Amino acid sequence: MRQHTRRLLPISIFCLALATMSGCGGGSSSDTPPPASAPAAYWKPALGDTWQWQLKGTVNTAYAATVYDIDLFETAPATVQALKASGKKVVCYFSAGSSENWRPDFSGFAPADMGQDLQGWAGERWLDTRSATVRKIMLARLDLAVSKGCNGVEADNVDGYANNSGFALTAATQLDYNRFLASEAHHRGMSIALKNDTDQLKDLVGDFDFAVNEQCHEFAECEGYQAFIASGKPVFNAEYAAPYSSDPAARAKLCADANARKFHTLVLPLALDDSLRYSCEP
């Protein structure tokens, strides 16, 4: 992810999820418990669904968006239920590829599973996604999402192999990990977004239910997402560049391109705190 905005949730809300973990020792991914024998039925966002993304502050529930993408740890179950009661679908965000030293389950990561710092993000380090310990923690996070009533999840930082992670991660190990996340989310009755990982879009479009992207317009990375659109799976895009918020002509050009691609594009602040929002919805 090109942007991270989180605050600490009291540890008590995570106890149920931690109870599902069998230990914190290292090991290979082959030690990870197998998924259930058959996936549960789950909600899948439609190509025309709209979205709102807010990870910091009290969630503004007033938007007409179909899908709300909010922080797994920050958001109280009552907020999730209130959104669902108003007809919204709720996607819960967590980082699947980095440790964050302010999260309540941080102590569960083995030191050997934490690699290089994420540049620009204090307290955050890349994870060895081959590790059984890492995968058990992610299973607990998925269980927490179920306990809160999330319809889907957004698993962030799932492109460690393409970054300076400090581990010998490869395209193959990344595909294995990302498919592990998708399978486990589906077996728990939740949809899952593919977050960024632009080099593996075609490989993973069949495993994920929708895409969440940051700044593909700014960095000319949007073309690969047509694989999702062609499969009837929505692309939820956020752009942060200052001209998109300050220059109506630049924003109009952005929105024309986004709408031609059938993307759902929002211009948002880096803080994702609802202090600014422009929608490209026609």
Image (spheres, helix red, strand yellow):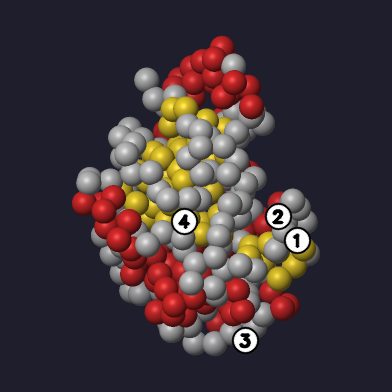
Q: Nearer the viewer, mark 3 or mark 1?
A: 1
Residue 135: tell me if it is visible: no
Which secondary structure lies at badge 2? loop
Q: CB under 8 Å between callouts 2 and 4?
A: no
How far is disc 3 from disc 1 in space, using C-alphas?
22 Å
How far is disc 4 from disc 3 in space, using C-alphas?
27 Å
Tell which of 35 and 139 is nearer to you. Answer: 139
Which secondary structure lies at badge 4? strand
Tell which of 250 and 182 is nearer to you. Answer: 250
Total of numbered circles in the picture? 4
In this figure, which residue is indicated by the disc labeled 1? Answer: 117
Q: Rate crowding at label 2 as few (under 14), some (14 to 19) or many (20 or more) other CA atoms within 10 Å.
A: few
Residue at x 54%, y 15% (from the top left corner): 248
Q: Rate crowding at label 1 as few (under 14), some (14 to 19) or many (20 or more) other CA atoms within 10 Å.
A: some
Which of the marked residues, 1 or 4, is nearer the chain's N terminus?
Answer: 4
In this figure, which residue is indicated by the disc labeled 3? Answer: 25
